[in-house]
Amino acid sequence: MVLDLTQLKTGQRGTIIEIQGGLGLTKRLESMGIRAGKKISKVGAQFWRGPQIVKVYNSQVAIGFGMAKKITVEVEE
């Protein structure tokens, strides 16, 4: 199943398939370790279109809702 990062439920894991954004967005996410092919899990989200908290490698990162909406993830069943 393929979803954007905002649609993942807390605790779900998946693999990043694509980042649909420009060079600036891609570079910014890569600096946080978020790139296509990497495993990611959702730790939590703030209420009402707030930041999405994810775990990549062994670190937790908060990503804005707009950025998270552009990250496509294949969910592990």
Image (spheres, helix red, strand yellow):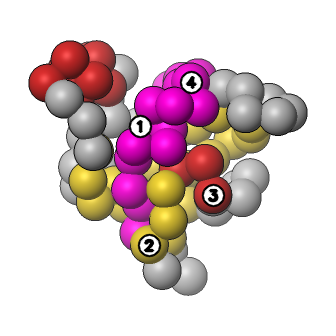
Magenta span includes 64: yes
* N-term mark: 2 or 1: 2
The residue that mark 4 highlights is: 64
The residue that mark 3 highlights is: 7
* N-term mark: 1 or 4: 1
Residue 2 spot, x, y in % from top left: 44, 72
Cα separation between marks 4 and 2? 20 Å
Instruction: Using the image, determine if residue 30 lies above or below residue 72.
Output: above
Q: Nearer the viewer, mark 3 or mark 1?
A: 3
* N-term mark: 3 or 2: 2
- Is disc 1 in contact with disc 4, using a CB cutoff of under 8 Å? no
* N-term mark: 4 or 2: 2
Helix, strand or loop under label 4: loop
Instruction: Give the residue type that dot 4 points to.
Output: Gly
The residue that mark 1 highlights is: 57
Would you call the spot at circle 2 few (<14 residues within 10 Å), some (14-19), or many (20 or more)? some
* N-term mark: 4 or 3: 3
Instruction: Give the residue type that dot 2 points to.
Output: Val
Instruction: Using the image, determine if residue 76 lies above or below residue 29.
Output: below
Residue 4 spot, x, y in % from top left: 49, 56
- Is disc 3 in contact with disc 1, using a CB cutoff of under 8 Å? no
Tell me what residue is drawn at x 48 percent, y 80 percent. 1
The residue that mark 2 highlights is: 2
Specify start and end residues of the magenta stretch as a single range. Answer: 58-74
Would you call the spot at circle 1 few (<14 residues within 10 Å), some (14-19), or many (20 or more)? few
Residue 5 spot, x, y in % from top left: 53, 50
Cα separation between marks 1 and 4? 19 Å
Instruction: Give the residue type that dot 3 points to.
Output: Gln
